[in-house]
Amino acid sequence: MKYRHLFFDLDHTLWDFDANAMETLNNVYQDLHLKDAGVNDFNLFCKQYLHHNAILWDRYHHGFINSEELKWKRMWRTLLDFKIGSEELARKMSEYFLEVLPTKQTLFPYTHEILQHLKQKNYRLHLITNGFEKTQWRKLDNSRLGQYFEEVITSETSNSVKPNKEIFEYALRITGATLPESIMIGDNLDADIKGAMNAGMDAVFVNHLQVKTDVEPTYTIHHLKELENIF
């Protein structure tokens, strides 16, 4: 085996963030009575949330904002699109969203099967995630994914974020892995793939969305089952 340690990303790679977020946003919309507050189009509400979430996560990845700003400002910016300038409501929505989101359990197809396959082949599996510590552990517990991973490295425990090389170096120290025997598996070209490559680590780009890119990772797949062709 060329590789011994497989480092997975969680959100958008194994755990279907968009599907789970949509379900959670529906809970937020209904339970907090957002229609009465002036958010009169649920589909547009979801679209704008995902838009602002992606922008603010990118800013968080690059150190321009902290985690607390990310949590509530994605809601605040979404409300502003509906001419609602309530920071109080935005913070309430954020708190409710983060409470409910980790209870959702939608995974990408073949997630459990591929992780079981890799464990049976004696690969050592770990997670490197920029997600929030408490939230990520709840996701893992509720979706029954925690059983597969030896170490879960978050941005909070490592005091760094992908794509910074420090979080990858921290992951190597914690797991006792070396670069030649390690590979990163993730969906985000910047945080996961470029981050790993800049740290000297091989990478598998999980291209669920069939995006075009000039980045040349070690491997590119479009479905998790394809990992069986690599490992």
Image (tube, grey):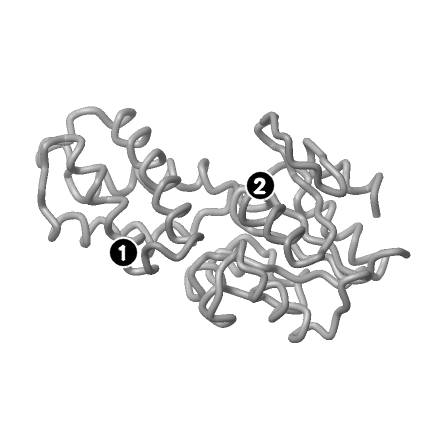
Say which amino acid is labelled 1: Glu
Position of 19 with respect to 218 (left or right) is left
x, y (%) of residue 110? 68, 39
Which of 180 and 77 lies nearest the eye of the viewer? 180
Q: Is residue 108 above or below residue 89?
A: above
Query: Dot 2, how many residues are within 10 Å of its Cα: few (below 14), some (14-19), or many (20+)?
Result: many
Say which amino acid is labelled 2: Leu
Position of 96 with respect to 207 (left or right) is left
Q: Give the quadrant of residue 205.
A: top right
Which of 134 and 220 lies nearest the eye of the viewer? 220
Residue 230, which numbered label? none
Which of 191 and 152 lies nearest the eye of the viewer? 191
x, y (%) of residue 84? 10, 37
Q: Give the quadrant of residue 146.
A: bottom right
Quarter of the picture holding the N terminus: bottom right
Q: Mark 1 points at which residue?
A: 69
The residue lying at 81 percent from left, 61 percent from top is 181
Q: Is residue 211 above or below residue 53?
A: above
How many circles with numbers are drawn on the protein?
Answer: 2
Question: Cα distance, mark 1 to mark 2?
Answer: 23 Å
Position of 160 with respect to 45 (left or right) is right
The residue lying at 54 percent from left, 44 percent from top is 190
Q: What element carries label 1?
A: helix
Toward the right, the furthest residue is: 1
Q: Mark 2 points at which residue?
A: 189
- Indicate which disc, 1 or 2, sits on the residue closer to the N terminus: 1
The residue lying at 27 percent from left, 56 percent from top is 69
Q: What element carries label 2?
A: helix
